[in-house]
Image (cartoon, rainbow, N blue to C red):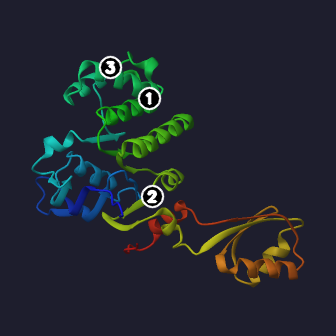
Amino acid sequence: MSYYPAIVLSVQNLTKTFSTGSFFSASKSTAIAVNKVSFDLAQGEMVGILGPNGAGKTTTLHMLVGVLKPTSGSIFYFGKDFSIARSELLQSIGFASGSLQLPTTLSVAQNLDIYARLCGLNKQERTNRIEELLTTFGMWSLRNSATGHLAFGQLNRVILAKAFLAQPQIVFLDEATAALDPDIAHTVRLFLTKEQTQNGTTILFSSHNMVEVAHMCSRVLVMKEGAIIADSAPEKLTHQIAKVRVQLTVLESSAQISHFLKKHSFLYTAQGNVVTIEIDEQAVAYLLNHLARESIMYSHISIDKPTLEDYFLKISYAPTQLTT
């Protein structure tokens, strides 16, 4: 018998508009920040949300955690309407964002302890969980420091700890690894994977780190101009880009190969003896055969397939259209 994970979040036609123009202006208009966004999340999924700046990612996340009220549309957690059971459902939701602020005069431990009390954790649970998370994120030694004295990356780690403090079933992360040192970012990624695989935590996070998203997520939501234009596995998105990069280190001057590439209308760049060619994957064999016929010798060749970053750049500048 097949097992299908339970749907823990269902979003239907979620829309957010803002009025533009001053209060006293005679001419007011409406800007659509999020336009009829629909998607489901299953238990234990780790899903990335990508899009250019202004695509509506943060606005969407803010509606999902109750920071903003939707103009229209519905949000259901575990089959319950978020607009009706908001207080109850927030107990099962964690949220971390660089835009969040914590009381600056309270220490790291005090900030987390107050939030843990609000979540209903007893004293022993609070003590154990705070120590566990601060140790994991390399912040235990700063537990008595005022949050107002922390660097931005350190504050991000405290906010991450806060998001997972009550062991929520769903966590939303907005640029969770931004401003983190590479070693700490790696630790955070390992922690997120552990939460997903061992505890079945559902995680939706936005990031500009394409390698991070491609490595961690089985699914990606791509937003542009307030709408979801793609909802697919990372590898399926990159397959939409037919071209690969062939990089050659030629043994002699690049003039000969440049002449050949221009003659055959190949798109390329040359820096010294290193030539990079963008070409359809099916044409790679054709290229190499003709280089051999022209006696163009090279000492090194690499063929790089399209990445999620290539896809991101493509959709950022292309006219908006729905893809899957």
The crowding category of the residue bearing disc 3, from other C-alpha atoms within 10 Å (few below 14, some 14 to 19, many at least 20), is: some
Work out whether residue 174 or residue 79 is closer to the camera in this orientation and state it. Answer: 79
**Which quarter of the picture shows residue 269?**
bottom right
Q: Is residue 267 left or right of residue 185?
A: right
Of callouts 3 and 2, which one flags the residue occurring earlier in the amino acid sequence?
3
Q: Which residue is mark 1?
A: 154
Is residue 72 shown left or right of residue 234? left
Q: Which residue is mark 2?
A: 218
- 321 is higher (above) or lower (below) than 60: below
At horizontal 24% and vertical 41% (from top left) the residue drawn is 92
User: Amino acid type of disc 1?
Assistant: Gln
For badge 3, the amino acid type reads Thr
**Element at label 3:** helix
Question: Which residue: 29% across, 50% down?
Answer: 61
Corner quadrant of residue 48? bottom left
Q: Is residue 27 visible?
A: yes
Q: Position of residue 95 (x, y in %)?
A: 30, 41
In front of the other: label 1 or label 2?
A: 2
Say which quarter of the image contains residue 246: bottom right
Instruction: Tell me how many marks there are.
Output: 3
